[in-house]
Amino acid sequence: MIRPGAVRLAAAAAAAVVAGCATGPTLEQRLQPLVGRSEGDIVAALGVPDRSYQADDRRFLTFVDQRSYIMAGEPVLGYRSYGRYGPYFAPPYYVNRVCEITFTVRAGRAEGYSLRGDACR
């Protein structure tokens, strides 16, 4: 016989596991509500742009998100420089990820945006 408390506990544990795997909204889902908003609303939401450019009757606002970190070296099995065979770690390496978000503004309203870079996923 299964106790009612055990069923509730199992249901709560399953819900916690599913919630732990859930991810937040994507970058596109977070930026889409800004399309059609004013330039001031975009600056209020994302901060001061890193670059801006005026061409014809359009203004381009570019926001740059840059992340840098050091990755640990991968384990390697092979001969070392002094002739011994065995496991060792390759040296760590530097990773730089960049995402540029450019909003196109015409008549004070955002028409759309574009994403560029490997950190925009």
Image (spheres, rainbow, N blue to C red):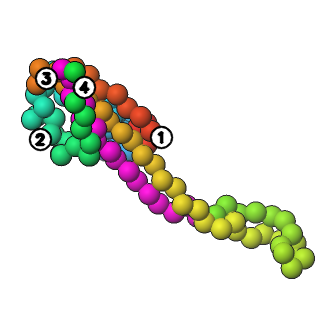
Name which quarter of the figure residue 89 lies in: bottom right
Query: Reading the chain from its start, which is encountered first: label 3 or label 4?
Result: 4
Residue picked out by circle 1: 118
Query: Reading the chain from its start, which is encountered first: label 1 or label 3?
Result: 3
Residue picked out by circle 3: 109
Query: Reading the chain from its start, which is encountered first: label 1 or label 4?
Result: 4
Distance from the alpha carbon under mark 1 to that under mark 4: 27 Å
Which quadrant is the N terminus positioned in? Answer: top left
Query: Could you say where residue 22 lies in the image, as x and y percent from the top left?
Result: 37, 38
Query: Reading the chain from its start, which is encountered first: label 3 or label 2?
Result: 2
Q: Amino acid at mark 4?
A: Ala
Mark 2 neighbour density, 10 Å: few (under 14) some (14–19) many (20 or more): few
Which quadrant is the C terminus positioned in? Answer: top left
Q: Amino acid at mark 1?
A: Asp
Query: Could you say where residue 32 lies in the image, as x and y percent from the top left?
Result: 25, 25
Query: Could you say where residue 51 lies in the image, as x and y percent from the top left?
Result: 26, 42
Observer-nearest of 33 and 111: 111
Q: Amino acid at mark 2?
A: Ala
Residue picked out by circle 4: 55
Distance from the alpha carbon under mark 1 to that under mark 2: 25 Å
The label nearer to you, 1 versus 3, is 3
Distance from the alpha carbon under mark 3 to that under mark 4: 15 Å
Q: Secondary structure at mark 2?
A: helix
Observer-nearest of 66 and 62: 62
Which residue: 24% across, 38% down? 52
Distance from the alpha carbon under mark 1 to that under mark 3: 27 Å
Q: Amino acid at mark 3?
A: Arg
Query: Reading the chain from its start, which is encountered first: label 2 or label 4?
Result: 2
Task: Point out the stretch of residues depicted in magenta.
Answer: 57-72
